[in-house]
Amino acid sequence: DGGITQSPKYLFRKEGQNVTLSCEQNLNHDAMYWYRQDPGQGLRLIYYSQIVNDFQKGDIAEGYSVSREKKESFPLTVTSAQKNPTAFYLCASSIGTGFEAFFGQGTRLTVV
Amino acid sequence: GIQVEQSPPDLILQEGANSTLRCNFSDSVNNLQWFHQNPWGQLINLFYIPSGTKQNGRLSATTVATERYSLLYISSSQTTDSGVYFCAVFYGQNFVFGPGTRLSVLP
């Protein structure tokens, strides 16, 4: 099946720990994105990548890091520097910049 | 940056009713998408509609780019239409989302 796979679906983290969220796509899309959603809110952009080995900060990049070593993979690391990491994280991809975006099922991260 | 507004913020309908959701944006955009977020959080693509009108079953959408707005029409609503509807505009290098319209369809 073609699509975007995020894992895990639920993730619990202790304060002070780094955690990495996985996003994989087999759509052969060049562009990939990470968004954060807080309860009752819209989506805010964390990072985006238009091509392999390149990525740019979004509106709320502080406390997060990414890599784009392979076209199909765009993992997001939530570091201990992120003060309020509990949120719903959504990954998306599109064939190119500005084209239709498709989303994964999301990862709910809870800091305990 | 660009401002994206959606109205109404909340909408409660009886099953079978029709509704119109609106998305206004403050600057020219290259593209626009409508999404439905289901109760499990997944974003479902409804329309990719930078301009013009599209229809898909009971749903249709119209974007008037020159006037900076888009409308999503839902006809004969069903309980499964409940959820949050987002519009997202492509501006600069990425998508900017509106705050959403929360729709509740009652049986």
Image (tube, grey):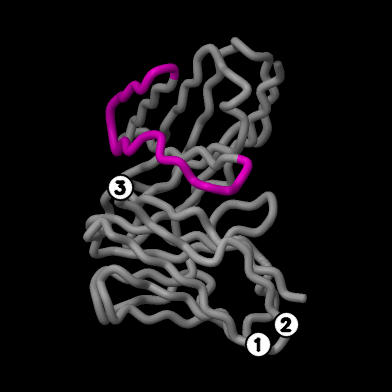
Q: Is residue A80 left or right of residue A106?
A: right
Q: Nearer the viewer, mark 1 or mark 3?
A: 1
Disc marking residue A17: 1
Rate crowding at label 2 as few (under 14), some (14 to 19) or many (20 or more) other CA atoms within 10 Å: few
Q: Residue B10 has which mark?
A: none
- Discs 2 and 3 lie in a common subunit: yes
The chain holding disc 2 is A
Kind of element beneath mark 3: loop
Read off the chain for label 1: A
- Report the disc number at residue A14: 2
Which comes before the other along the chain, label 2 or label 3? Answer: 2
Contact (Cβ within 8 Å) of mark 2 with mark 1: yes
- Residue B8: x and y, percent? 62, 31
Location of residue A71 with respect to A105 vertically, above or below = below
Q: Is label 2 in a helix, a strand or a loop? A: loop
Mark 2 → mark 3, Cα distance in angstroms: 36 Å
Q: Residues within 10 Å of mark 3 (few under 14, many from 20)?
A: some
Query: Label 3 belongs to which residue?
Result: A100
The span picked out in magenta is B39-58
Extreme-right residue of the structure? A112
Amino acid type of disc 3?
Glu
